[in-house]
């Protein structure tokens, strides 16, 4: 079996199997892939250094070898807080109003990708598969090719891919996309993002696309395909049955004293539609005064990317909205929105999800959204809650039995809350069974296997993808 070299912006390995911590689904997925493939996980340590040395800090944690580098303050400003999170992230989430085009960001992005390439190079052996993750590292493959790496290399993009009309607002967009075509496999979360990418390469670059989904570029074939990411179903269901989950469940249930509970769990990010969600709940309380005092929204939102101004603004905005809605609808023994800015161990989250009658997942745009799938996996099949899901999350393409909503429409979401609260048990069970089948069958192990198989060059049975 080939070794897998995984490269992502950050590296996240739990100290011990099953250790508590706010570890996201991606980290769990990559850890399981790496254990199976005797691989190495390379990325930024999260630490700053005065002068970049490229020194590799190698560690072996829970059967996974990690290799990390430190970055300079200027690198972090221009590459991470700059091009990655002030240019590409908003652009890829259709927010050109928040997209900043600063020349120094682009230079920092190229410089850090080159630093990643130089540092990971000595770790790569001839038969290794190289799997690069996300928008931080789009040109990394082309930089490795320039250094003579001939291994099979794949890229998986966790975010949406924007429509061509938006992407062309990015200076040097063609150079960026051309650099991606040095990979052998390019993976997207959904068919929609894949189609946007194919539209760009065919209409803007004039490249031929074959029926089996390969793009032809400079005599090579690149496979572009949708690989929808999932949750670690077994781990999550097991976690939901654990003593800690049970304790978290009981503690939360006791605190809401027989009221109905809605839950939202999101990184604090403008793409997650939290402001619109709060307003929708406010509208629900105004439109249904008989329900005031009966329904609580628990919103768990750990801060992220706090050095970027748009993230500071969303935080202030949400604090104001929470105060406003609570001020209008609270009384001495009841507060409608519980807004919590911290992370929780996954087992606790599973208990919280199970305690909630409604999962409210309403991003304005999301590559996939794992919270929607975790909510479904954590439910009691005999008395499941209802998932309200944004039509603009990648997950909506699989989770069609959720109550799909337009998160921009305060009325629509408010009506969906009412419908979910009134939904009879038989309908809840029937919808949940369909959702659960999808979450179970298209789980993270399948995602990883499908991608690695494609990367290995066996997706079409004859190993022709990208072979040079
Ligand atoms: P994110 O934008 O971070 O991921 P999401 O898919 O919802 O969004 O994953 C977040 C993960 O973090 C979930 O596993 C969740 O349980 C966890 N999490 C969130 N808040 C937490 C808290 N307070 N405590 C503990 N854990 C918490 C990006 C893309 C998504 C895509 C994923 C994976 O933006 O669209 O689904 O990558 O590809």
Image: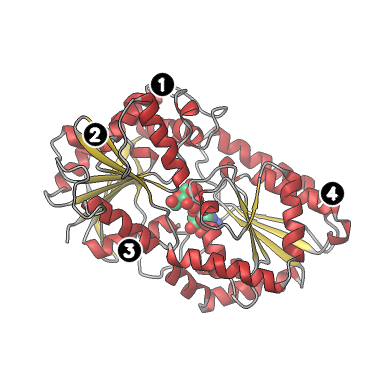
C-alpha distance separating marks 2 and 1: 19 Å
Q: Mark 2 near mark 1, Cβ–Cβ under 8 Å?
A: no
Residue furthest front in the image: 211
Mark 4 burial class by Cα count in 10 Å: few <14, some 14-19, many 20+: some
C-alpha distance separating marks 2 and 3: 27 Å
Q: Is mark 3 within 8 Å of ligand 1?
A: no
C-alpha distance separating marks 4 and 2: 55 Å
The label shown at residue 142 is 2
| Pick the front one: 218 or 293 | 218
Q: Residue at x 59, y 52 (%)?
A: 301
Which element type, helix, strand or loop, lies under badge 4?
Answer: helix
Mark 3 burial class by Cα count in 10 Å: few <14, some 14-19, many 20+: some
Quarter assignment of residue 39: bottom left
Counting residues from the start of the chain, the first of labels 4 and 2 encountered is: 2
Q: Which residue is mark 3?
A: 32
Counting residues from the start of the chain, the first of labels 1 and 3 encountered is: 3
Which element type, helix, strand or loop, lies under badge 2?
Answer: helix
Mark 1 burial class by Cα count in 10 Å: few <14, some 14-19, many 20+: few
On screen, residue 188 above or below 24: above
| Pick the front one: 228 or 292 | 228
Which element type, helix, strand or loop, lies under badge 1?
Answer: loop
Q: How many marks?
A: 4
Q: Which residue is mark 1?
A: 171
Q: Which residue is mark 4?
A: 328
- Can residue 30 be seen here? The reply is no
Q: Is residue 461 found left or right of 344 in the rendered image?
A: left
Q: Residue at x 34, y 29 (%)?
A: 176
């Amino acid at each position: 079996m080939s070794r897998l070299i995984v490269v992502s912006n950050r590296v996240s390995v739990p100290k011990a199997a099953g250790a508590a911590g706010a570890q996201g689904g991606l980290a769990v997925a990559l850890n399981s892939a790496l254990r199976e493939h005797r691989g190495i996980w390379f990325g930024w340590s999260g630490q700053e250094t005065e002068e970049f040395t490229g020194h590799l800090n190698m560690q072996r944690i829970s059967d996974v070898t990690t290799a990390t580098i430190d970055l300079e303050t200027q690198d972090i400003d221009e590459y991470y807080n700059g091009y990655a999170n002030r240019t590409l992230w908003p652009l890829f989430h259709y927010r050109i109003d928040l997209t900043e085009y600063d020349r120094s960001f682009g230079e920092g992005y190229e410089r850090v990708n080159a630093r990643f390439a130089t540092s990971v190079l000595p770790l790569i052996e001839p038969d290794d598969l190289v799997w690069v993750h996300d928008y931080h590292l789009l040109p990394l493959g082309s930089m490795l090719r320039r250094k003579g790496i001939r291994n099979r290399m794949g890229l998986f993009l966790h975010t949406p891919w924007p429509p061509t009309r938006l992407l062309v607002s990015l200076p040097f967009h063609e150079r960026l996309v051309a650099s991606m075509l040095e990979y052998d496999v390019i993976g997207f979360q959904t068919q929609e993002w894949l189609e946007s990418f194919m539209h760009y390469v065919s209409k803007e670059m004039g490249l031929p696309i074959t029926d089996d989904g390969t793009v032809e570029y400079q005599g090579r074939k690149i496979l572009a395909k949708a690989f929808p990411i999932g949750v670690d179903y077994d781990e999550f269901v097991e976690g939901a049955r654990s003593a800690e989950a049970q304790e978290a469940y009981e503690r939360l249930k006791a605190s809401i004293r027989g009221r109905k509970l809605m839950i939202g769990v999101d990184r604090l990010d403008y793409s997650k539609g939290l402001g619109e969600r709060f307003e929708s709940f406010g509208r629900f309380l105004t439109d249904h005064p008989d329900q005031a005092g009966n329904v609580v929204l628990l919103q768990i939102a750990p801060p992220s990317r706090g050095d970027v101004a748009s993230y500071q603004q969303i935080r202030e905005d949400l604090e104001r909205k929470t105060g406003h809605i609570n001020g209008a609808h609270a009384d001495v023994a009841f507060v409608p929105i519980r807004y919590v800015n911290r992370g929780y161990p996954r087992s606790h989250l599973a208990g919280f999800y199970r305690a909630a009658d409604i999962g409210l997942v309403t991003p304005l745009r999301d590559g996939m959204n794992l919270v929607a799938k975790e909510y479904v996996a954590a439910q009691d099949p005999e008395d499941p809650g209802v998932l309200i899901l944004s039509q603009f999350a990648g997950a909506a393409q699989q989770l069609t039995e959720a109550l799909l909503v337009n998160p921009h429409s305060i009325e629509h979401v408010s009506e969906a809350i009412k419908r979910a609260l009134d939904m009879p048990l038989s309908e809840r069970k029937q919808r949940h069974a369909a959702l659960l089948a999808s979450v179970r069958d298209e789980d993270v192990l399948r995602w990883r296997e499908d991608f690695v198989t494609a990367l290995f060059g066996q997706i079409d049975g004859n190993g022709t993808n990208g072979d040079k």
